[in-house]
Image: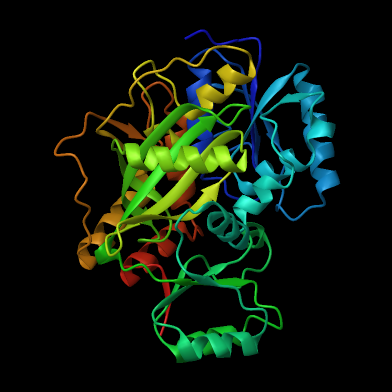
Amino acid sequence: MDVDRGVPGLIVKFGNYPLHHGGVGAIRSLGRLGVPMYAVTEDRCTPAAVSRYLERAFVWPTTGTEEPERLVAGLLRIGRRIGRPTVLVPTDEEAAVLVAEHQAELAGRFLFPRVEPGLPRRLASKQGLHELCAQHGIASPAAHFPRSYEDVERFATTARFPVVAKNREAFVRRARPAVNGTTRIASREGLLRLAREWGERPGVILQEYLPREDAEDWIVHAYFDAESAPLAMFTGVKVRSWPPHAGMTAHAYIVDNPELADLAARFVKEIGFSGIVDLDLRFDRRDGRYKLLDFNPRMGAQFRLFENEPGVDVVRALHLDLTGRPVPEGEQLVGRRYVVENIDLPALLAYRRSGYTTPHVPARASGTELAWFARDDLRPSLVMLARLVRPGAKHLYQLWRTSRRGSGAAAK
């Protein structure tokens, strides 16, 4: 692969989530090609910080709620220390939005896709995404955006339960979220009880519930160039997620879906986005439509599931394109499997209890990519395990507690 080894990559993340397999995957993906890799980390003993493919970890604890000017200044300091133009690889919405909204300040030090400055923030917002879907004819779950408790009361009188509550904006998870992730609400009484805690201006979206027995979870990862043309496009099916049915991918397969790829390419072209995308869609068997749930304007944590025959994934496509190299074309590796070791076992137990299966799982995997373990880079998996089981760690208890529930958070 004709990669420019003179241009480093920098993994950019804000907030405290040290067990992030996506960042480790990006470091390995480019590092294996000889690209010098750097990363923003919470401390010096995170899985990303100990990867053999990392040149240097820049320890910079953040919450994601800092003033943008402070975050931009911090990135520029890191850029000066690296000392040469560097490809930015955001791993969360905060980083992707910051880069888009401060392109002029960052352009001298960094390489990144140019995009309309306000677009990533709008895509990361549940309300902004819903409005874009309606504008461009993309199916999405029916949604209501209450502006007061009285508005919630009016909605509750006509709503068909269960409904789903989500935080309206992506960034509130770093501050004070109204709900803890996707919350299934079974009754009018449960909704009103929760709504009393949301304050005068509820920062939530109340969304149509798509029954899992009538639905399939699909994912699209792609890289789009400056003209919003796909240089790398992948589709897959999500077998399990954590928390169950409502969280990050724990187990997935590459499955060809030309209809879904065409839908995603058309939407991205119409909105004029450039860069890496990670889309979550649910196929509703009741009406035969793919409904867009999430549009992440950045690299997804499970991106290493997707690779084509020449070895291109979306992070490699990003680096190749931004350094003026051609992105090799090829068929995606159908049947390839991705497993996140620390969350797939509890997810498996929860899914067995729920009885959920997807009809699109291949009979045999053509290959397996593990999120943490790699023979050529063992230390990240060892550090992940050490942080997982260390005294006082809450992670294992949280896994057990969610597995016992067998689903995402719920209110009756």
**Quadrant housing residue 273:** top right
Q: Position of residue 182 (x, y in %)?
A: 47, 66
**Is 158 situated left or right of 83 in this image?**
left
Q: Is residue 389 left or right of residue 56?
A: left
Q: How many marks?
A: 0
State the scheme by which the image is colored: rainbow
Occupied quadrant, residue 88: top right
Residue shown at the point (45%, 14%) measured from the top left: 328
Q: Is residue 114 above or below residue 199?
A: above
Tell me what residue is drawn at x 52 percent, y 7 percent.
2
Identity of the residue furthest to the left in this view: 363
Give the vertical position of 178 relative to 158 (above or below). above
From the viewer's side, name the closer residue of 41 and 302: 302
Work out whether residue 180 can be spotted: yes
**Where is residue 236 drawn, in percent x and y?**
34, 40
Q: In front here: 37 or 89?
A: 89
Report x, y in % for residue 135. 58, 55
**Residue located at (61% from left, 66% from top):** 168
